[in-house]
Image (cartoon, rainbow, N blue to C red):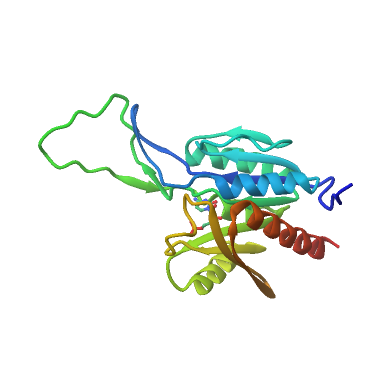
């Protein structure tokens, strides 16, 4: 039988985009497919973890053995994450969270006019930073999608948000990153780094989950 190095491990993963309502029929979002987060959830379940998958709106089947919590807005994802994180051993923030939400969501459909229209946006809470600031925090892994100076921005993000690990992808490459099947990652932790070369997201997720397992075991033993 395959080894289950994550048996007994509670894991929470955020995946997919979030949606910020403008009015009852419109929203702001992004192109995240959720593929990477779902592939990570599947890889973690295969290694024996108990996985809670907090998912924004995506067109993907729930991986076998994972408990899926569907959310739409960033605030809903934040609430689910902060409820599950204190009971989790590992927290992986793979979601492409909307950084801003509409200040005042219109109750009725906004009518068009010939004038310009302005939307006032306010900052959303940073989910992974809030989890990493919990007193009894899990082992926290974040992602960074950058178009330049990938390593530099990723390491800075890891320190600023108090993450244990960060996986950076270069989304300026047309065949890698957002809403595509392949990806490549540069992973950093406090005293090391590893390149995971371009592969399909499932293979990459298996490699990344192995790396997360190794680092987690190293930190907790
Ligand atoms: O700062 P930036 O958005 O580039 O950081 C990306 C990382 O932070 C990802 O792991 C993402 O899931 C997480 N994040 C979050 N909540 C936010 C914004 C980003 O958890 N509001």
The answer to whether 78 is drawn above or below residue 209 in the figure is above
The answer to whether residue 195 is left or right of residue 51 is left
The answer to whether 125 is drawn above or below residue 176 in the figure is above
The residue sitting at 61% across, 63% down in the picture is 166
The answer to whether residue 158 is left or right of residue 87 is left
Query: Percent x, y for residue 212?
Result: 72, 59
The residue sitting at 57% across, 39% down in the picture is 55
Of residues 137 and 194, the one nearer the viewer is: 194
Residue 133 visible to the viewer: no
Point out the residue furthest to the top here: 108
Q: Quadrant of residue 38?
A: top right
Query: Percent x, y for residue 217?
Result: 81, 61
The residue sitting at 81% across, 50% down in the picture is 6
Quick one: quadrant of the C terminus?
Answer: bottom right
Q: Quadrant of residue 129?
A: bottom right
Residue 203 visible to the viewer: yes
Query: Percent x, y for residue 149?
Result: 46, 74
Query: Percent x, y for residue 101?
Result: 39, 43
Point out the residue furthest to the right here: 1
């Amino acid at each position: 039988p395959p080894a289950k190095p994550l048996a007994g491990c509670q894991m929470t993963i955020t995946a997919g985009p979030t949606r910020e309502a403008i009015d009852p029929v419109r929203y702001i979002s992004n192109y995240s497919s959720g593929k990477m987060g779902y592939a990570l959830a599947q890889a973690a379940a295969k290694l024996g973890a108990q996985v809670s998958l907090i998912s924004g709106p995506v067109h993907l089947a729930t991986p076998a053995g994972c408990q899926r919590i569907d959310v739409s807005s960033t605030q809903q994802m934040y609430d689910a994450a902060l409820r599950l994180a204190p009971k989790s051993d590992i927290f992986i923030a793979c979601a492409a969270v909307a950084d801003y939400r509409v200040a005042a969501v219109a109750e009725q459909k906004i009518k068009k006019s010939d004038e310009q229209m302005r939307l006032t946006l306010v900052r959303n809470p940073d989910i992974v930073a809030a989890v990493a600031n919990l007193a009894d925090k899990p082992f926290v892994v974040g992602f960074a999608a950058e178009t330049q100076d990938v390593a530099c921005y990723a390491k800075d993000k890891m320190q600023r948000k108090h993450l244990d690990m960060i996986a950076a992808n270069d989304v300026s490459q047309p065949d890698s990153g957002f809403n595509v099947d392949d990806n490549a990652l540069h992973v950093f932790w406090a005293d090391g780094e590893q390149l995971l070369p371009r592969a399909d997201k499932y293979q990459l997720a298996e490699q990344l989950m192995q790396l997360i397992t190794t680092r987690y075991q190293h930190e907790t033993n």
